[in-house]
Amino acid sequence: MQIEDLLTNVLNFWNLELKMVHPETKIHGSSERTITRMAVEDYHNKFYVLEKISPRSYPKKAKIIGYLESLSKKGQDKVPKYHKSFEGKYVVYFNGEYWMVRDYIMGQELPRPQFVYDYWRGNVLAHYLVDLRNASEDIKPDDDKFSLVEFIKRHIEHLQRNSFKMEDKLNRAYKYLEGNFFKIYDQIPVTFCHGDFHPLNVIWGKNDIQSVIDWEFCGHLPECYDVANLIGCVGMENPKALLSELVLEFVDCLRSQDFLSDDDWEYVVDFILALRFAWLNEWIRKKDHVMVNLELTYMNVLIDNKSMILNDWLKF
């Protein structure tokens, strides 16, 4: 079957008539979440994203769409909108492959690294997390509980088994977390989180959020998870950005809403450090030695400057 015929037949399940495929159109978010994806236009001049997913990812995708549907019903209008086929299914099986369709959202490019000086981004990001928590109150935890501590331990064991040289910087970061953070981790309250909340997983408008994307890691996680990941990723642009306008406004807004307890805020820097192990794992997997070295340096910057960072965040 020719590719155009295939796409025409697939889109027919959504009563969409293919006008054109737009390979030049940028699709925000990670391409690794799908086998392939493309921007398509119908004869009403409306754009969609057509995604082909692996059979292995189908159950997880279906669960995520269930979460997004629940959030949408609670008024969350900044989540990806997937469409049901004429059969009432979000995922269609055709020609031996699984397909999904969602709205295409055009956004503005994130100005890197200058965006860290935009206090308004910190404001809208904080309010998004508050709205997400309110909208997700009825989402029940599932049985797939993720433990960041267990992930870090398995990661270190894997590196040791594969004769990865445990550099002093990495060993120091692990020992630091082992000293206290591992012990208190299970005491942190759990709530529904995005799971990969950072500026590049946002489709930005001129002065607001258009949509938050890439929900692959969403679920019930420690309540400071999204906060720590967002701040940690901003700091990875430049460690000085940990005290930038974006971060300070983000923290101030969340504190004004009592989003985290005082005890939680005391552990946010440690949580950032712990989450960097997940990013380190990604750089090692991709054999990106430059990013591995940057990550290890960043981990130690967090340890050395924890007190100063917390003092600036919590001084008011």
Image: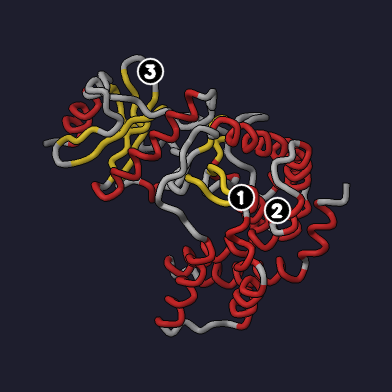
Lower sequence index among marks 1 and 3: 3
User: Which residue lies under the disc numbered 3?
Assistant: 45
Residue 274 in the figure: left or right of residue 214: right
Q: Residue at 47% of width from left, 63% of height from top? A: 282
Residues marked 2 and 3 touching at CB (< 8 Å): no
Query: x, y percentage for residue 183?
Result: 62, 68
Query: x, y percentage for residue 35?
Result: 30, 47
Query: x, y percentage for residue 264?
Result: 70, 53
User: Which residue lies under the disc numbered 1?
Assistant: 189
Mark 1 to mark 2 CA distance (whole Å): 9 Å
Q: Is residue 17 visible?
A: no
Q: Residue at 62% of width from left, 34% of height from top? A: 128
User: Which residue lies under the disc numbered 2?
Assistant: 264
The amino acid sitting under disc 2 is Asp
Please tell me whether mark 3 sits on a helix, a strand or a loop.
loop
Q: Quadrant of the N terminus?
A: top left
Q: In this view, which residue lies farthest toward the right?
A: 316
Lower sequence index among marks 1 and 2: 1
Q: Nearer the viewer, mark 1 or mark 2?
A: 1
Label count reads 3
Q: Residue at 27% of width from left, 34% of height from top? A: 91
Residues marked 1 and 2 touching at CB (< 8 Å): yes
Question: In the rendered view, would you say 83 is above or below 237?
Answer: above
Residue 95 in the figure: left or right of residue 34: left
Q: Nearer the viewer, residue 142 or 235?
A: 142
- Near mark 1 (Cα within 10 A), the count class, few <14, some 14-19 or many ≥20, is some
- Near mark 3 (Cα within 10 A), the count class, few <14, some 14-19 or many ≥20, is few
Query: x, y percentage for residue 248?
Result: 78, 46
Mark 2 to mark 3 CA distance (whole Å): 48 Å
The amino acid sitting under disc 1 is Pro
Q: Determine the image quadrant of residue 10.
A: top left
Lower sequence index among marks 2 and 3: 3
